[in-house]
Image (cartoon, rainbow, N blue to C red):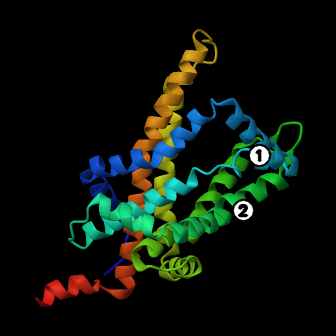
């Protein structure tokens, strides 16, 4: 069984399209704590506590202020694990309910969170180190505001995102621990890293294009300051809706990459072989 960029992308969009309603339900459930936290910030005591946490990170370095304290990656990792169970079940001709996927994710929650944290360190952590190295106190960002710098930073992010791409499915589907899952992700991608990179690049370009398209459609006129607050509010809601719509796509993509890499190296699963012989 060959691992191909076109077949992976085609399978991803097919599974995503056919399962969008139920995956959307999972995504909404995953975003409940994320959105709920934003409402909790309306409470003065909670807002003060979060501000102290952010300021503590900011004293370490300003680049840590916004990304380091975020906990939204935890429900997103749980969503990825649940969708991985459903997606791989679909690819193996098994009808797997979203509740079974969610139950599997919650049973493995401790290992999923640890694995997601390690993956986050290998991506967000490395990019934050780059930000710190290129930080300029006057601009509060990189020293180089050039297109080349942004392209280089995006390229770094894409490459880092391929290293342990399928670690979460390995935890959820193969009952592996964090370090075993990272090793499994590294081993499965061996010999196919350029193809995995191409797949991640296509997804990155698609997502960035949609986000930029939304921004330019709603906020592109710098001379129009009328109702600017309302426009930002509407843009915020539209961006959240787009984020919820796209979140399961990435989870499906990762699951399809995992199953196709596994099948290319190890052949059909035991349950599939059993059905063939029966």
Residue sitting at x 13%, y 90%: 277
Which residue is at the far left? 278
Q: Where does the image place residue 181, in percent across and percent down from the top left?
A: 52, 78
Nearest to viewer (mark 1 / mark 2)? 1
Crowd rating for badge 2 (residues with CA inside 10 Å; few <14, some 14–19, many 20+): some
Category of crowding for the residue at label 1, using alpha-carbon neighbours closer than 10 angstroms: few (below 14), some (14–19), many (at least 20):
some
Can residue 5 be seen by looking at this rendering? no
Rendered image quadrant of residue 128 = bottom right
**Residue 34 drawn at (x, y percent):** 53, 44
As drawn, the label of residue 152 is none
Residue 212: x %, y % from top left: 53, 36
Task: Kindly identify the residue that appears in the image at 62 percent across and 64 percent down.
Answer: 117
Q: How many marks?
A: 2
Q: Give the residue pinned by disc 1.
A: 53
- Residue 103 relative to residue 116: left or right: left
Residue farthest toward the bottom in the current orientation of the protein? 277
Classify mark 2: helix, strand or loop: helix
Q: Which quadrant of the rendered structure holds the C terminus?
A: bottom left
* Horizontal side of residue 87 vs 108, given as left or right: left
**Residue under the point 40% across and 44% down:** 28
Seen as rendered, the residue at the extreme top is 226
Q: Secondary structure at mark 1?
A: helix
| Residue that badge 2 annotates | 126
Q: Position of residue 206 (x, y in %)?
A: 46, 47
Identity of the residue drawn at 46% across and 55% down: 202
Comparing 198 with 26, the one in front is 26
Q: Is residue 138 visible?
A: yes
């Amino acid at each position: 069984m060959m691992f191909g960029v076109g077949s992976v992308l085609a399978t991803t969009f097919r599974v995503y399209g056919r399962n969008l309603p139920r995956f959307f339900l999972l995504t909404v459930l995953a975003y409940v704590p994320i959105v709920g936290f934003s409402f909790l910030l309306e409470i003065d005591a909670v807002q003060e506590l979060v501000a102290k946490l952010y300021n503590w990170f900011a004293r370490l370095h300003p680049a840590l202020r916004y990304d380091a304290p975020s906990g939204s990656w935890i429900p997103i990792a749980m969503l990825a694990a649940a969708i991985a169970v459903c997606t791989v079940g679909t690819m193996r001709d098994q009808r797997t309910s979203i509740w079974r996927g969610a139950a599997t994710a919650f049973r493995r929650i401790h290992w999923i969170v640890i694995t997601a944290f390690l993956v986050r360190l290998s991506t967000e952590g490395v990019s934050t180190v780059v930000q710190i190295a290129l930080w300029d106190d006057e601009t509060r960002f990189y020293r180089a505001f050039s297109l080349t710098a942004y392209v280089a930073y995006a390229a770094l992010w894409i490459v880092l995102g391929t290293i342990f791409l399928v670690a979460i499915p390995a935890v959820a589907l193969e009952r592996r621990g964090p370090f075993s899952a990272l090793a499994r992700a590294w081993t499965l991608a061996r010999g196919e890293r350029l193809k995995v990179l191409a797949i991640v690049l296509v997804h990155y370009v698609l997502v960035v294009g949609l986000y930029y398209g939304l921004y330019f459609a709603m906020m592109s006129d710098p001379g129009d300051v009328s109702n600017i607050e309302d426009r930002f509010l509407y843009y915020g809601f539209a961006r959240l809706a787009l984020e919820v719509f796209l979140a399961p796509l990435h989870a499906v993509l990762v699951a399809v990459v995992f199953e196709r890499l596994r099948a290319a190296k190890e052949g059909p699963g035991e349950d599939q072989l059993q059905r063939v012989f029966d």
